[in-house]
Image (cartoon, rainbow, N blue to C red):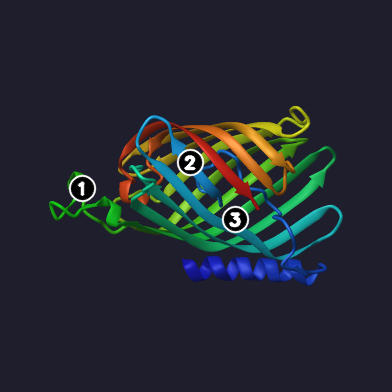
Amino acid sequence: MKKIFLFLFVSLFSTVFAQSKIEFFPSGLTIQPFAANTLEPRLGFVFHTTENQLTLNIGNSFDILRGGDSISTYSFGADMFTYTRLSKEGEFHFPVDAVDYLFGVNFGYKTYLKNFELGARVRISHISAHLVDGHFDNTLDVWKDSHNPRVFSREFLEVMPYARFNSLRVYAGLTYLFHVDPVSIGKDNYQVGFDFYLPVKLYGIAYPYIGYDFKLIHNDSYSGNNSIVAGLKFGSIFGKGVSLYYQYYSGNSIHGEYFDYKVDYSAIGINLDL
């Protein structure tokens, strides 16, 4: 299955890029991250307000090749990032409880049709998850909460088409896991969402924005994850800057070691948009 996917994408993009002027390592991204989607490249912190926890995001996506014309753009790029679960202790200590790693490749396409931008992002990625020493009780010599490390990894194909009108973007997605541990996890996930940036600067310094993402995930059964964000973007709406935002999340934990744990929290985040 992996070889078939890779062959199809290599064949498709080889044909497309052969007919276009190619730019290597261009600036910016062809497809900007979706604001409320939890599985996006981020560089910053998310401070939970309802529990002793925070998330550290360290990651980036970048375009390696980009081609096209004045109407349509194609790209091939890479994704590499981590999202880490930490707890808060005194004297500025933040023990690391769990960490998830993602790396993979992405393909982007967008075109303009009258007043609309239409496009899609395709990712082929690997995720692995691990418990870390902050989850271990050195005094009792046991893993905390009787939660021992377990194998969690997945390789998946994600297809995310979208439509943008001015600064409103709506999208829908399908994720197919062609390999997953534990094997009891279902292989199909679905999602829909939007993000909207008010195209007027608040007090001349920041763009207000809001986003919502709903993901229907398949573990032993289907269940819904909700992510809502609202914040301010300092810098370019669709480019570099700093985002300050509020997030509400409910559903299954985003961390693989806790994939079957239900969580419900509010948080304040800061993100460097590269």
Tag 3 secondary structure: strand
The disc labelled 3 sits on which kind of residue?
Answer: Val
Residue, disc 2: 46
Q: CA distance from mark 1 to mark 3?
A: 38 Å
Tag 1 secondary structure: helix
- Nearer-the-camera pick, 166 or 236: 236
* Image location of residue 241, percent across then percent down: 69, 46
The disc labelled 2 sits on which kind of residue?
Answer: Val
For mark 3, does the 10 Å Cα neighbourhood hold few (<14), some (14 to 19), or many (20 or more) residues?
A: many
- The residue sitting at the front extreme is 91
Q: Is residue 17 left or right of residue 219?
A: right
Q: CA distance from mark 2 to mark 1?
A: 23 Å
Q: Is residue 28 left or right of residue 263?
A: right
Tag 2 secondary structure: strand
* Image location of residue 234, percent across then percent down: 70, 39
Residue, disc 3: 122
The disc labelled 1 sits on which kind of residue?
Answer: Lys
Res 165 → quadrant: top right
